[in-house]
Image: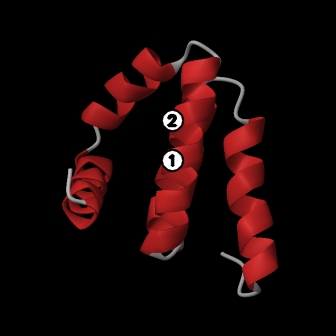
Amino acid sequence: FPKEPSVRYATVVGLSVRAATADEGYAAFNWLAQVAPAEWVQLFATDMFRVMRHKGQIGALATMVQKDEKLQKFLKEFQQLVGL
C-alpha cells in the first residue's frame, strides 16, 4: 500500500470507482483489508457500498462479504467505531 497520502487516496477511490462487478469490489476490499490501515479500508468500504448499490451489485457483494470472516470482523469493528 502506498505511503504518500494523496496516492493512498487515489488508490482507494480508484479501486472503488473502477470495480464493475461485486467480484471486483470484493477482491479490492479483501486486498485493502490485508494491506491498508483501517481508516483507508473504511473510506473504501463506504465508497464501495455506494458504488455497488448504484450498479445493482450490492446484494452479491454483501453475500461474498458475509462469507468472509476477516471482512466480517472488520465491519463489526467499524460499526462499533461509528456507533451503529
Place of residue 43 in the rendered image (x, y in percent of width and height, measured from the top left) = 55, 59
Q: Is residue 40 above or below residue 70?
A: below
Amino acid type of the residue tagged 2 in the rendering: Phe
The answer to which image quadrant residue 4 occupies is bottom right
Kindly identify the residue that appears in the image at 59 percent across and 45 percent down. Answer: 47
Amino acid type of the residue tagged 1 in the rendering: Thr
Q: Is residue 75 above or below residue 66?
A: below
Count residues near mark 2 (Cα–Cα under 10 Å), then give few for <14, some for 14-19, many for 20+: some
Kindly identify the residue that appears in the image at 47 percent across and 51 percent down. Answer: 30
Residue tagged 1:
46
Count residues near mark 1 (Cα–Cα under 10 Å), then give few for <14, some for 14-19, many for 20+: few
Would residue 44 appear left or right of 80 to someone viewing this image? Answer: right
Q: Are marks 1 and 2 in contact (CB under 8 Å)?
A: yes
The answer to which image quadrant residue 73 occupies is bottom left
Would residue 67 appear left or right of 4 to someone viewing this image? Answer: left
Residue tagged 2:
49
46 or 29, nearer to the observer: 46
Kindly tell me whether residue 67 is visible in this rendering: no
The answer to which image quadrant residue 2 occupies is bottom right
Place of residue 61 in the rendered image (x, y in percent of width and height, measured from the top left) = 45, 27
Cα distance in 3D space between marks 1 and 2: 6 Å
33 or 46, nearer to the observer: 46
Q: Is residue 42 above or below residue 68?
A: below
Kindly identify the residue that appears in the image at 63 percent across and 31 percent down. Answer: 51
